[in-house]
Image (cartoon, rainbow, N blue to C red):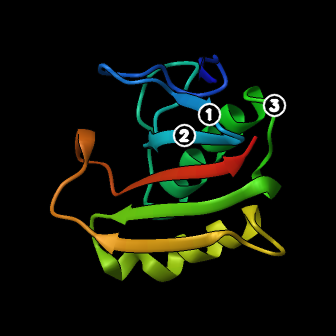
Amino acid sequence: MREVVSTDHGPKAIGPYSQAVKANGFVFISGQVALNPATGQLVEGGIAQQTERVLENLRGIVEASGSSMHKAVKVSVFLKDMNDFAAMNEVYARFFPSAPPARSTVEVARLPKDVRIEIDLIALA
């Protein structure tokens, strides 16, 4: 079974994709950037502020799907600049204080809307 998840607790999709899809006992959340779901605007500030907004967006979507951040099993982090790793990691650790999910972190050439970070997440449904 496949179910599309759509919620106001995360930014609306800005292309032909779903915020999240529940399938086979998992929730697959599309990559999120630092858009405020209430305004549709990018948050101001540096990597810490953007990371916090991205993780809040992920939390809103995963909870709307009936799951939680504690059920996350895999996270992919895409950074515009690997020099932001330590600051991103500090914020990230607050959202996964114990038994964190598996994670990949890579530096990329460019991200949508020229943000500094994008994160996607897979969780148990």
Q: CA distance from mark 3 to mark 1?
A: 13 Å
Q: CA distance from mark 1 to mark 2?
A: 11 Å
Q: Residue at x 41, y 22 (%)?
A: 13
Side of 80 relative to 44 (left or right)? left
> Is 119 placed above or below 26 here?
below
Disc with the residue nearer the chain's start (1 vs 2): 1
**Residue type marked 1:** Ala
Q: Which one is in front in this view, the residue at disc 1 or the one at disc 2?
A: 1
Neighbourhood count class around disc 3 (C-alpha, 10 Å): few under 14, some 14–19, many 20 upward: few
Residue with the mark numbered 3: 66
Q: Nearer the viewer, residue 46 or 88?
A: 88
Disc with the residue nearer the chain's start (3 vs 1): 1
Provide residue 117's location: percent of width, then percent of height.
39, 57
Q: Nearer the viewer, residue 49 or 12?
A: 12
Side of 98 relative to 87 (left or right)? right
Quarter of the rendering occupied by the N terminus: top right
Q: Tell me whether the residue at label 3 lies in contact with that at label 2, contact meaning CB atoms closer than 8 angstroms.
A: no
Residue with the mark numbered 2: 29
Side of 122 relative to 115 (left or right)? right
